Image: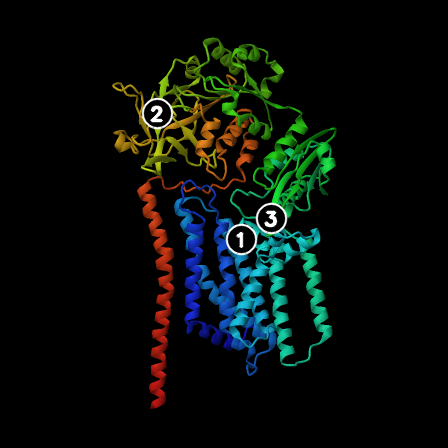
Amino acid sequence: MINKSLYKHSLYSFFINPLFYVSSVLTVLYTSFMFYFVNRFFLVSNSNISISAFFNSISSVFILIVPLLCFRIKRFIEDDSLPVGGFCRFFTLAVSVFSVCLIPLLLLVFIPVSVNFFGRIDAGQIFTGYLALVFYTFMAICFVLFLFSAIKISQNILSLLLSITVLFCFNFVHLIPLYLKTGDGLSVFLQKMSFAWHFDSASKGILDSRDLAFYFFASVLFLFLAVFCENKRTERKISRVTASLFFCSLIFFGISFERIYFRLDFTKSRQFSVSQTSRKLCSQLQNPLRITYYQSKELKNFYPQSQEVAEYLNAFASSSKNVFFSIKKAEPEKLERLGIQGRQMKSENSTKVEYTTVYSAIVLQYLDSSSIIPFSISTKTLEYDLAQRVQLLVSGKERKVFIITGNGFSEEDYSYVQPWLNARGFLTQTIKTDEISETLQKIQVQDIKNTQILVLGSDKLNEEQSQSIKTAVENGVPALIMTSPYSVDIKDEWKVSKKQNPLLKVLNGWGFAFDFSLAEDISNFPLTMTSTEGSDTVYKTMNYPLWISVLPQKEAFEGATITWASPIICYGKTEPLLVSSPLAWKQKPSENSSSLFILDPFVVPKSAAAQGEKSESLTLAAILQDKGKNLNVALISDQFFLNSLMTGFISNSEQGDFRNYDYAASILLKLRGEEKLGLLIQKNVSNNSLYKISDENAFIKQQNLVLIVCFAVLPSAILIFALCFFIFRKKINSIYGEKNEK
């Protein structure tokens, strides 16, 4: 299949030409720049770092690099004196170009390795991404070789530019429906023809046989088309029967692989697979469960990832013989009768702006009951949304949560709590302060297991109200309490005060004690402060150790943010839930100042040494699950953990930070004995934060090391190899020259 002589000559032609070395250096520099700078990898507050950006950068730069490298061996395509058959010639040339493309690809392995220095990397995602990249690169090479054999232009530069343009168009042809109105059939066709579209699943850790089959058959097709063009140029006869049989075979196998396929999930947490928890729930179904996905035909144009929703729903249905799945076209009138509202999406071109209403709703029907997921465009929490609804349909038991705001704040100050918990399958009800005792006393014995209490702050609760909470909890009602000994005026000057709190005595009796200090940590949320110098506004970002950025832990895969917390001391059967980093410390209350603590971001000490304290891990949240006493209580030492104003502070301009809310939902489920179901909330969450290095100086040092390797060491290695090769070649030529003279 491969002609060794031609392979060696083509490789040699690469190594003696500076174009190969320049293109390799360009690949390394471009990919590094896009990943580290354009993707803002080193921005600590950026929680959306994805290794997919690394693979997308390589596939993008190869739009230029592959035609350049193929251009170098164009003379071998047009050399009729080569004693090599058509298909063997093009296949050999494709393998030679692919061989030299592997050199920068192998060097770039350092980038995903460097991610592991700062955060967590998924080896399965790297495997599928690189495997698909290999298939994609070889197909792109075959495509360009076909273009060079088909394009008959005397100007070589024009043919190179044309091949780059055509490859670019085929790479991003799936984006056309975003800017131009296309029919449903044409939109699907463009997606299937796009080279980059078939790379998306692999970059996320999914190995889809349809994508690999596309790259394989496309490579074979382009090679045979190149041979066809070459035979036409040299006026060789082509058997029509052979050509027809070949193309019919390709179409047949292409359709077969489209209908008979597999999708393997290589991610560490099996993000895109149906978990055992869901399989167990589905096994409890005694009657058919029908899942209907109502999807607008325009949805894929705005949300290409919505295809993954359909794929996952199909996999979910395959997990049980009693689950049936179907996709239906969204009919607005019918969906509105079901209470489902569409979303308006904006599309614009050079002449006008249009708004399109799209639907992506999932309806579950079981016997006479039904449940609706009103809008779903990704698989991030899809399994949890399905599983908790299946459980509710099977058991018929609702998850009631009584919300008590015990710190004097209004319901608006915690405005996200009810909508968020409702979306997670809880039935919430806010209890007014003066109705706490009466409401909790009315909880029926049969409702205890399905009822929970969420307490948001406690310094305004009196003795009677605290005792009512104590009685309800000791009767078996699970409770999640968010409080601490100190209160901060978050709406004014951040003044801290300590007030007598009857609920703290109740917590103490259960095994939760507070250290009367404030926890600080080197792993913290960076505050952006503004100051005015003359007429200019100056922005300064500084670490604020009193707002602790909790590193990823068992129940908090994404971490959390806890503000002005007092360390918890656990005793008895109480166990820690969330802990700080080992480099945390305590700020003890001052006796000589009008203010108990230093809260000013400009003045507060930024390390344990500056505070004059020792570094240690501090408990910020704890849990008590005592089956003997029927106690299920969790405590988070932050009454503002779910506060709307604080959520706004820790969110960025692009998206809100709602990690605390999902963590609270998972703890509520854990207290109910549904821990496995709670873990599904964050199952599809990848921790992309740079959490491994908390020290600022150590982070900068490691950052500089990575940048030196990517922008200096790797390019230098390529140039040194080039220099060594040219020196070696010169010596060999001089030796042969001396022999010839003799």
Tag 3–tag 1 contact (CB < 8 Å): no
Tell me the element at label 1. helix
Q: Is residue 71 above or below residue 543?
A: below
Q: Is residue 187 above or below residue 478?
A: below
Tell me the element at label 2. strand
Q: Amino acid at mark 1?
A: Thr
- Residue position marked by numbered label 3 in the rendering: 348
Residue 524 seen in the current view: no
- Please report whichever mark, 1 or 2, sits nearer to the chain's N-terminal start: 1
In which quadrant will I find the N terminus? bottom right
* Coordinates of residue 295 in the picture (x, y in percent): 68, 42
Q: Amino acid at mark 2?
A: Leu
- Please report whichever mark, 3 or 1, sits nearer to the chain's N-terminal start: 1
- Residue position marked by numbered label 1 in the rendering: 128
Q: Residue at x 46, y 41 (%)?
A: 47
Q: Is residue 74 above or below residue 254?
A: below
Q: Look at discs 1 and 2 and give the one toward the viewer.
A: 2
Marks 3 and 2, Cα distance to the nearest angstrom?
52 Å
- Residue position marked by numbered label 2 in the rendering: 518
Task: Point out the residue furthest to the top here.
Answer: 464
The local crowd at label 2, few if under 14, some if 14 to 19, many if 20 or more residues have their Cα within 10 Å, is many
* Coordinates of residue 68 in the picture (x, y in percent): 49, 68
Q: Look at discs 3 and 2 and give the one toward the viewer.
A: 3
